[in-house]
Amino acid sequence: MATLQQHVLEKKAALAATIGDPLSGLARECATVWPDADRIDAILAGHIQTIPNCANLYAWDLEGREISSLVGRDGVDREWRGRDLSNRPYLKNNLPFKGVMLSSVYENMLTGEQCVTALQAVRREGELLGFIAADFAMSTLLADAKLTAPDTNYQQYRGDPAVRGTLFMQQRATSRMDEHIDLALETIYRLLVEHGVFHAKIHFSSGRCSFWLLDDPYNYRIHAVDEIVDPDLTLYYPMHPYPSEAKITPRQIRAVFAQLRDLRFADETVYLRSASINIMNGMLGLTFSCDGSHYMPVAEFIDKSLSFWLGELVDDDRKCKTRNNGESE
């Protein structure tokens, strides 16, 4: 699956492909009259409507000084002539000596909007004269954009080094959730399967849970252990059929909860602190005492044995302990 950076590069490439030819033609025309500000303004004003979604066009020289006006779709602002643009965010990157380059997203100093700027090199007889800049507001560029599918591959993130460095100096303390874990997990199972909860975050160490519901996805509800183990809690949540769009089955939820219980009690030093499960995307999140976090599809989690987790986590954190002890000597 493509990474976030790859998705961003694809969108930038698509924008560059759309505006590349119009900006290239514009640069060739401006090169013939460079650096005559009035004639450059006329060319920019005559072409801005031909560049899709472009908010402003302007030209600047090799020292970062604007030599044209600020040409927008609604008019020309001559007060911008001669302004120093060398502190603009996009000038911190390497400039294009040929072709077009897109900046990173930055805040427009005039409108406060997020935007990107395309820079097109202006050349005449092989000599670089300056650049044409084209501003694009993100609100316009992304008006019809679609979300890409989220990454559902197994991902692991190391946590706070201070926590990892003192891992083997601590031991799991029995929580209220531990004392009632079977009843708590049974209640959470019922809420997921019969009462419309699609995302649950279980905090084993602090003894609380957070629930997101299909019928009210913009809010979450928090319950302490005493409420979770109260058999009347399910009266609080209306009945809801298990969604046909769910990526996992109730049987898989049972299997996940059995393994979460094992991971909580399998080791007194390396143990599960919290877990989240989402039935709609089929993803599971795990956070351990070493403060490391893991995200993976439920089916992949079920396939992993307890020895996988204990072997990986204990070995990894013992290496961390050894390294920290060596550095302190």
Image (tube, rainbow, N blue to C red):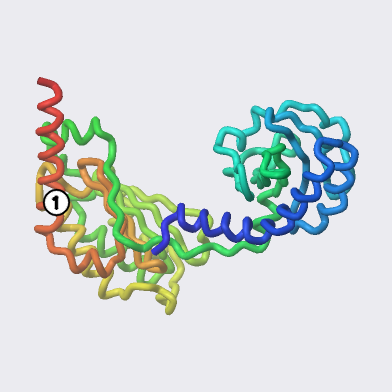
User: Residue placed farthest to the top in the image?
Assistant: 329
One can see residue 230 in this view:
no
Quadrant where the C terminus is found in the figure = top left
Q: Is residue 318 left or right of residue 217?
A: left
Residue 195, position as x, y percentages in the image: 41, 69
Q: Which class describes the residues within 10 Å of circle 1: few (<14), some (14-19), or many (20+)?
A: few
Amino acid type of the residue that numbered disc 1 sits on in the rendered structure: Glu
| Residue closest to the eye, 94 or 279 | 94
User: Residue placed farthest to the bottom in the image?
Assistant: 244
User: Residue placed farthest to the front in the image?
Assistant: 125
| Residue closest to the eye, 182 or 108 | 108
Secondary-structure class at tag 1: helix
Residue 130, position as x, y percentages in the image: 71, 37
Above or below: residue 103 compared with residue 249: above
Residue 137, position as x, y percentages in the image: 70, 48
Which residue is pictured at 36% across the width and 63% down the height?
152
One can see residue 118 in this view:
yes
Q: Is residue 235 left or right of residue 173?
A: right
Above or below: residue 221 compared with residue 175: below
Count of picture labels:
1
Which residue is pictured at 71% across the width and 44% down the height?
125
Quadrant where the N terminus is found in the figure = bottom left
Above or below: residue 192 compared with residue 53: below
> Label 1 belongs to which residue?
312
Which residue is pictured at 35% across the width and 54% down the height?
201
